[in-house]
Amino acid sequence: MVEKKKEKHSSGEPRHIGRPPSPIPQKAGHAVIDLLKEAAGISRENLERAMTMAHRLSLELRSAKDRIRELEGDVERLESRATRAEQWLATIKKEIEDTLIAPMEANRSKPQTMN
């Protein structure tokens, strides 16, 4: 069995003396590099899509928070109006009872005299 001597090429790669270099490792290496480039491109696209979506969602969230604050203000104003309306209704009810119902009941309870 004859051993082939290995020498280092100027690029640092081993070089086999006596036989031509095989194109298979070079093709495989280029294929791996091409796949890595493709994966990096896909990764960049995914990152860009994710960043775009994150930005859009951030704007939507800010808008939703603003709308929530606006609606909370509306609720406070409406609750205040409802409270004032209830107070007015209580005042009106008391006034009706004092000026209309109480005198009518007083008149009913008085014995009626015949002329």
Image (cartoon, rainbow, N blue to C red):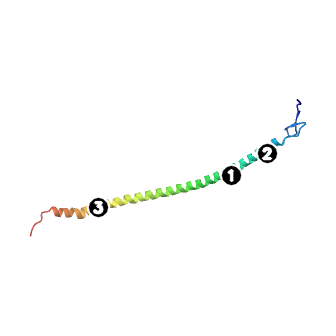
- Which one is earlier in the sequence, the residue at label 1 or at label 2? 2
Kindly indicate the quadrant of the structure image that contains residue 90.
bottom left
Mark 3 — residue?
93
Q: Where is mark 1, residue-wise? A: 45
Q: Position of residue 95 (x, y in %)?
A: 27, 62
Question: Element type at marker 1?
Answer: helix
Where residue 13 sits in the image (x, y, percent)?
84, 38
The image quadrant of residue 114 is bottom left
Residue extending farthest to the front is 1
Q: Residue at x 23, y 63 (%)?
A: 101
Q: CA distance from mark 3 to mark 2?
A: 92 Å
Return the residue at label 2: 30
> The disc labelled 3 sits on which kind of residue?
Lys
Numbered label tally: 3
- Compare residues 105 and 13 and report the one nearer the observer: 13
The residues tagged by marks 1 and 2 sit, at their Cα atoms, a distance apart of: 22 Å
State left or right for residue 33 relative to residue 55.
right
